[in-house]
Amino acid sequence: MRLPSVLLALVVAGCAGAQASSTPAAARDAIPALDSAKLLGDLFRLSHDSMAGRAAMTPENAKARAYLVSEMRRLGLAPVGASFEQPFAMPRRNRPDSVRGVNVVAQVRGTRFPERAIVVSAHFDHVAPRNGNIYNGADDNASGTAALLQLAAHFQRHKPEHTLIFAFFDAEEMGLLGARAFVANPPVPLAQIAANVNMDMVARGDNGTLWAVGTNPHPVMKPIVEALVPASGVTVKMGYDTGTGRDNWTSLSDQGAFHAQGIPFVYFGVEDHADYHEPTDDPEKVNAGWYYNAARTIAAFVTRLDVAVAGWPPR
């Protein structure tokens, strides 16, 4: 997909990131280089008007899902089980009807500890058109979905020590239903899942801050976040995991399903902005250079987490 020239210029300018070294320490400390043009291209593709918001149980959602499956095949990832597509039916909160959705789940097997897994996730659904307006959901959450595609590509080239499960969750907007279905009927035993890294709204760094949520309920994550050196222009802050309501993000996105099972998580996201859940959440609003470096920072965190999990006792 063709990108606006101003975004393409920003992307090209951000492409000089360092490649991970072959030595373990250098690989742990490097900021991975991702395919910035593909990152932005996927964001624009997923948040195009033709996707009509990618709401669960719509043809456009199925279209987005088919693209994710095709990318998993193109990258050479393996499914977790018989298929990349994992259908589910889950009841909506406070409603008698069930939602039927489909998660897309793939894996890169670990080189040293394949029996332990880290789930890296993002939801690919958004909301349906209303009153003639299309809610493209560029930041929420085409941004996390496109970043997850890049992380899958990166770790397919740079194999992790532990198995990485890449989960593209459906029906998050209806109550974390895809993630809840995943933990209710996991493709691997829950005891083998060491941690979850979730991404939801990671493109609009309007104030330069990427929040890392989860270190308060799961202190094992704190030293990993503290040791993280972000890519240029990205400030990582810990918080939003105490208190109540919108000040506590612990269960406001798919990481909540893992937290409910006692699985440590870090959720990466930005603060709500004026375009949150509005028809104006469009890809043109994204700061392309910052988004690219936020995705690289999250990839670096997953690399550090992969090293750290080896020292954790079994759950």
Image (spheres, rainbow, N blue to C red):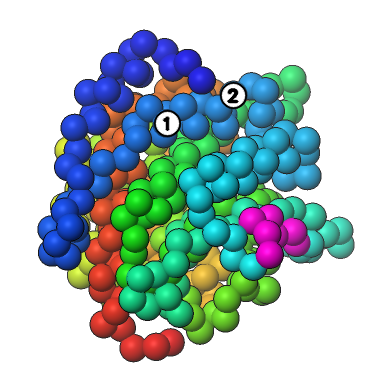
Residue at coordinates 34% horizontally, 27% vertically from top-left? Answer: 288
User: What is the x, y in percent for residue 227?
Assistant: 16, 62
Q: Mark 2 against mark 1, which lies toward the viewer?
A: 1
User: What is the x, y in percent for residue 8?
Assistant: 34, 18
Q: Which residue is denoted by mark 1 in the rendering?
A: 38
Does residue 212 lie above or below 10 as drawn?
below
User: What is the x, y in percent for residue 253?
Assistant: 53, 56
Residue at coordinates 19% horizontally, 38% vertically from top-left? Answer: 17
Residue type, label 2: His
Residue at coordinates 38% horizontally, 62% vertically from top-left? Answer: 266
Q: Nearer the viewer, residue 119 or 69?
A: 69
Does residue 227 lie above or below 39 as drawn?
below
* Quadrant in the rendering for residue 127: top right
Does residue 27 lie above or below 62 as drawn?
below
Residue type, label 1: Lys
- The part of the chain drawn in magenta is 82-88
Q: Which residue is denoted by mark 2 in the rendering?
A: 48
Name the image quarter holding the C terminus.
Answer: bottom left
One can see residue 247 in this view: no
Does residue 257 lie above or below 85 as drawn?
below
* Quadrant in the rendering for residue 38: top left
Relative to 280, 204 lies left or right: left
One can see residue 12 in this view: yes
Q: Nearer the viewer, residue 237 or 231?
A: 231
